[in-house]
Image (spheres, rainbow, N blue to C red):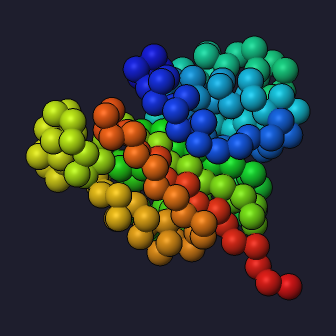
Amino acid sequence: MNSSHSKLTDWGLEQISIDDHYTILDIGCGGGRTVSKLAAVATQGKVYGVDYSEESVAATKRTNARWIDLGRVEVRLGSVSQLPFPDGMFDLVTAVETHFWWPNLLADMREVFRVVKAGRTLILIAEIYKGASTTAARLVEKYAEQSGMALLSVDEHRALFINAGYSDVQIIEKRDKGWICGIGRKPIANS
């Protein structure tokens, strides 16, 4: 997973700005490569990884042992449905190749919204979505329902962000690859 999603992750992260002091959360951290990429960019910040799989947490810790020793990375066992973090903690939340597996997509998007700082960003990055023109996408789409995947179209991604409360929503496609990323910002409340 680490190497197969690396180019996709790089492309997705190129769509946003990441400041060196950011506190970042990677949901569904898997093998830990995205956590490592983020720690290399947020050189004065801290990156957290969370995954519901004990094996993924262990793999992310192995991949990021140096960053953990430096106090720059922390990895926790947990679910997107009940994130083990306080309200408004993160400047950026990333989720690469995971949101289509979330147990309750809208409720989970709202749970992510809870931990994002006002004015800050969530980015979802995936190599497959409903309506993509690649052979792999069409095959996955055919069996998505049986597998439990919640594949969304471009418009459904946009609606998901908006319905969860995000503003400044952008949905970006790399059509030749079948890649998609959704970006939303948590609004700053009127004072």
In the picture, measured across the screen, residue 116 lies left or right of residue 54, that is right
Viewer-proximal residue among 138 and 108: 138
Viewer-proximal residue among 59 and 11: 11
Could you say where residue 93 lies in the image, as x and y percent from the top left? 63, 48
Badge count: 0
Would residue 7 be seen by someone viewing this image from the given angle? yes
Could you say where residue 13 lies in the image, as x and y percent from the top left? 59, 37
Q: Residue furthest front?
A: 176
Would residue 82 be seen by someone viewing this image from the given angle? no
In the picture, measured across the screen, residue 157 lies left or right of residue 56, that is left
Say which residue appears at 21% left-offset and 42% top-offset.
133
In the picture, measured across the screen, residue 31 lies left or right of residue 159, that is right
Could you say where residue 190 lies in the image, as x and y percent from the top left? 79, 84
**Which quarter of the picture shows residue 26?**
top right
Could you say where residue 149 lies in the image, as x and y percent from the top left? 27, 49
- Quarter holding the C terminus? bottom right
Say which residue appears at 39% left-offset and 39% top-offset.
174
- Quarter holding the N terminus? top left
Say which residue appears at 25% left-offset and 45% top-offset.
132
- In the rendered image of this protein, does residue 115 appear above or below residue 76? below
Q: Residue furthest bottom?
A: 191
